[in-house]
Image: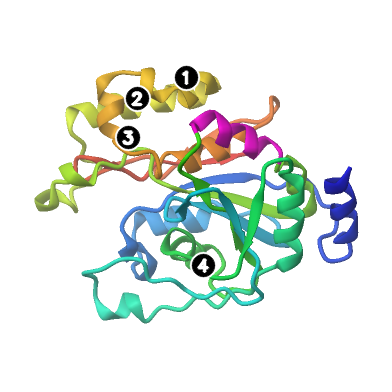
Amino acid sequence: MNSLNNLSNISEQFSTTEKMPVLFIGHGNPMNAIEENQFVEGFKNSIKNVPKPNAILCISAHWFTNGTKVTAMEFPKTIHDFGGFPQALFEVQYPAKGSPELAKATSEILLPTEVKLDYDWGLDHGTWSVLKHLYPNANVPVIQLSIDYTQPPSYHFELAQKLQTLRRKGILIIGSGNIIHNLRLVDFQNFDKDNYGYDWAIEAHEIINNLITKGDFKSLIEYKNLSKAVQLAIPTPEHFLPLIYAIGLQQKNEESTFFNDKLVAGSLSMTSIKIQ
């Protein structure tokens, strides 16, 4: 009841809309933020024919926390959470406003899970490197929801389902990570080779894409029971869990459409999906 009341309280700012799609974005190399390439074009195309959101809620692989948090400041800072890149990348700012109202509503929707209102984080590159291309004028309020590293995938799937009601308040929900993400095995010599993956990455890509297409979310949640190729593709969970949030929001009458569905540098994928 509290969550419904809170949504009612912000209805003037977040009017009821047609159901917004859900995106999972394979964000890849931070340099995508300042480059024009096939993947950036895919980011841009993903929101064609999507009404301008009232706000954006992003679950980024790069905010991995003990407990669940949501950014609640008026003006989130742009976080340059990487090293070894050109100065031009560090100079990028994404000055989107936050939404304390949406942050509070989100925390109440997710009860009885405790979601702490956070005033320290901001927008990390998993968020702004993508939104810079989707909404280059930074004219849509943005909040981030963190990923609790103490919890199993099933927790994140169930938490995502509670966010469903936000989609009819004009909130675009985005998961930002990479389905195949093994940085230790990156083939830097072939980084620019088109759709290049090791044999195990090709196998994992086919397995996971087929599970998404079939709607076999149980197997995706229990990915640790899948093949050795999948274990190599997902050596740590933080880049995979944003996908779990996305599929947790998919309803029975909705389908997933793939875009940017390519492998990179042997051990990474840019595979992204649009759910609607």
Tag 2 residue = 206
Front position among marks 2 and 4:
4
Q: Which mark is residue 121?
A: 4
**Amino acid type at mark 3:** Ile
Q: What's the residue at 70%, 60% (across, down)?
A: 103
Tag 3 residue = 234
**Amino acid type at mark 4:** Trp
Q: Name which of mark 4 and mark 1 comes first in the sequence.
A: 4
Q: Position of residue 60 (x, y in %)?
A: 48, 53
Q: Within 10 Å of the Cα at label 4, are there few (<14), some (14-19), or many (20+) other Cα atoms?
A: some
- Dominant secondary structure, magenta: helix
Q: In this view, does 56 lie above or below 87?
A: above
Q: Which mark is residue 219?
A: 1
Q: Quadrant of the N terminus?
A: top right
Q: Name which of mark 1 and mark 2 comes first in the sequence.
A: 2
Q: What's the residue at 82%, 52% (across, down)?
A: 17
What is the C-alpha distance between the residues marked 3 and 1? Answer: 14 Å
Front position among marks 4 and 3:
4
Q: Within 10 Å of the Cα at label 3, are there few (<14), some (14-19), or many (20+) other Cα atoms?
A: many
**Amino acid type at mark 1:** Ser
Q: Position of residue 221 (x, y in %)?
A: 49, 26
Query: Residue 254 is drawn in which quadrant?
Result: top right
Q: What stretch is highlighted in magenta?
A: 152-162
Q: Do the CB atoms of the residues marked 1 and 2 lie less than 8 Å apart?
A: no
Q: Is residue 210 above or below residue 155?
A: above
Q: Name which of mark 2 and mark 3 comes first in the sequence.
A: 2
Q: What's the residue at 30%, 42% (across, down)?
A: 181
**Amino acid type at mark 2:** Glu
Q: Name which of mark 3 and mark 1 comes first in the sequence.
A: 1
